Image: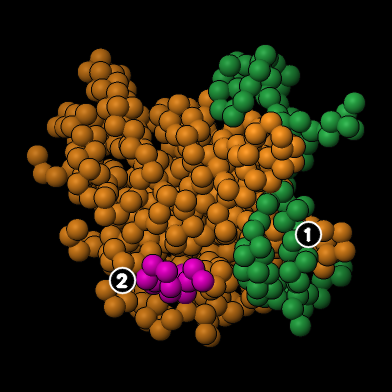
Chain colours: A green, B orange
Amino acid sequence: MAAISREEVAHLARLSRLAVTEEELGTFAGQLDVILQAVAQVGEVAAADIPPTSHSVPLTNVLREDVVTPCLTPEEALSGAPDAEEQRFRVPRILDEDVAS
Amino acid sequence: MTDVTAMTATQIAGLVATGAASAVEVTQAHLDRIAAVDGRINAFLHVDTEGALAAARDIDARRAAGEELGPLAGVPVAVKDVLTTKGVPTTVGSKILEGWHPPYDSTIVERLRAAGTVMLGKTNMDEFAMGSSTEYSAYGPSRNPWDTDRIPGGSGGGSAAALAAYEAPLAIGSDTGGSIRQPGAVTGTVGAKPTYGGTSRYGLVAFSSSLDTPGPCARTVLDAALLHAAIGGHDPRDSTSIPAPVPDVVAAAKLGATGDLSGVRLGIVTEFGGEGAEPGVTAAFNEAVATLTKLGAEIVEVSCPHFRYALPAYYLIAPSECSSNLARFDGVRFGLRVGDDGNRSLEEVMSLTREVGFGPEVKRRIMLGTYALSSGYYDAYYGQAQKVRTLITRDFTAAFERVDALISPTTPFVAFPLGARTSDPYQMYLADLFTIPTNLYGGPGISVPCGLSDGLPVGLQVMAPTLADDRMYRVAAALESAVGTFTPPAL
């Protein structure tokens, strides 16, 4: 049985903000199915009592000294932006007009 | 003067230090070599001719003024396009960052400059460092100087190919699952993944933050060690940077070069045997093991029972972190924006931008990670993979109670023909079968050329305990002293 359906891949693409094409959906569904069946092998390991490792470095709450250091100017920070206005990143509308009004 | 492009970084630094060659001459020779051969190799995405010559002139002026310069001053270096370079294009091999000129330098690039090295340009890579062949680069694959119909490894295939094609004596890579070591192995060059946290990730475009490790690539073990020493060490701008000194990897490489490994215990992992590697790789590896024995090393077989789950665990952990990290590429703050016609909503513009800007492997991994992190699947996939990561770490810890370092083939197979593994993504993933466990554990690993199989290079991997990077350099240098270096046919 397939581990993942075409509908589930379409849902994942929406969650991932990827406007995938119909053709891609079919390709990705087949490929992700193969990959998911392979990685599901981790389920064979008896690990109920094993603590998870998120990170190999045993450091927590690393803070820097509370001193002012140089940083980017607004012009530098905005230098790669596709669109900018009044020292801000300019974005397309976020809400539908009838909702916003 | 003999051809400086054929020299090691150590030799070039010696020429510049004594004034036998200027940094400008050395740099120009490498720029000429790039102009002559890179059309066939495609190692570079961007050659910074003016920046390189300006940096070289600066080194020459400082030397003329009597300034004390570092051991790599005047040596050219190629930098993987995953590291930000102020004012110099940084694409990460992706269309989504095409034309981006970062406003800041990564720590690694800052340190390269402080060491007096001369950056030649930025090297090709699989998009966002996801791949084992550079075929997932949005700018076309790099080619292996040993056989230009074959892959140079990946993701850092551009850096490795630049070394093997004598376009640069030093290069920087980044290793998340093998992206420094596997390209080193298939191009007959040296690639070292430092201990995680031993080299700064500040300015390294993130793929999988708990695994990504920048590191040195070179044609000799000593050169790699010198580069490692120049870029390594604590960086307060990276909260995962380890506040400890870099082990003396240069001294270790010099010690190893004496060819004496008496008293050193090396482990061979039982679970890496069997059907893992192709016969030619296994034969070259076995021959190298015999050589290491002759050098005085004691060989012990050790069992690491959870290593067989490393590949599946990695392909849950890395995509999960990738799906989160790559959310920042949304067409707002930098890079590409598609479909902003005044009618589409922000969400529609984001989705179109990411659809057009990302290639298929990046999309697969984002969706795979999104799946593994979904409620309902989290415990069975991401959570379980993190537990397996703990067990793999315990396997390493137990092994290092018995041996000083572990050895294995770096990759299961030699450089494969372009196109051979792109139709089945999982076949590509298998290239990192032997390198991934080290990333999950966080320790250091190095690939050093150990022989040829049907005329193509085979690498031997040395894996050492966390923060014992010096050990792997000693073993690698000893092997190199016995088997020599490997030169591809003239291009």
Tell me the crowding category of disc 1: few under 14, some 14 to 19, or many 20 or more residues within 10 angstroms, Cα based: some
Q: Which residues, given as a range, are shown in magenta?
A: B411-423
Which amino acid type corresponds to the residue marked 2 in the rendered image? Leu
Between B27 and B445, the residue placed more toward the observer is B27
Residue B456 badge? 2
**Residue B251 in sight here:** no
B418 falls in the magenta region? yes
Give the quadrant of residue B144: bottom left
Residue B270 at what x, y percent from top left?
Answer: 57, 80
Q: Are marks 2 and 1 in contact (CB under 8 Å)?
A: no
Q: Does the rendering let one see residue B168? A: yes
Whether B304 is among the magenta residues is no
At a point 23% along the width and 61% down the height, the residue shown is: B487
Query: Distance between the Cα atoms at labels 2 and 1?
Result: 44 Å
Can you tell which of label 2 and label 1 is closer to the viewer?
1
Q: Position of residue A50 (x, y in %)?
A: 82, 66
Q: Position of residue B268 (x, y in %)?
A: 52, 75
Image mark 1: chain: A
The residue that label 1 is drawn on is A11
Circle 2 chain? B
Q: Residue at x 72, y 48 (%)?
A: A17
Residue B293 placement (x, y as % from top left):
39, 75
Q: Is the N terminus of chain B in the top left, top right, bottom left or bottom right quadrant? A: top left
Residue toward you, B193 or B119: B119
Q: Quadrant of the C terminus of chain B?
A: bottom left
Q: Secondary structure at mark 2?
A: strand
Q: Secondary structure at mark 1?
A: helix
Give the vertical position of B52 relative to B297 (above or below).
Answer: above
Numbered tag placed on residue B63 in the rendering: none
Q: Residue at x 26, y 50 (%)?
A: B39
In the visual, does B476 lie left or right of B14?
right
Residue kind at label 1, given as amino acid type: His
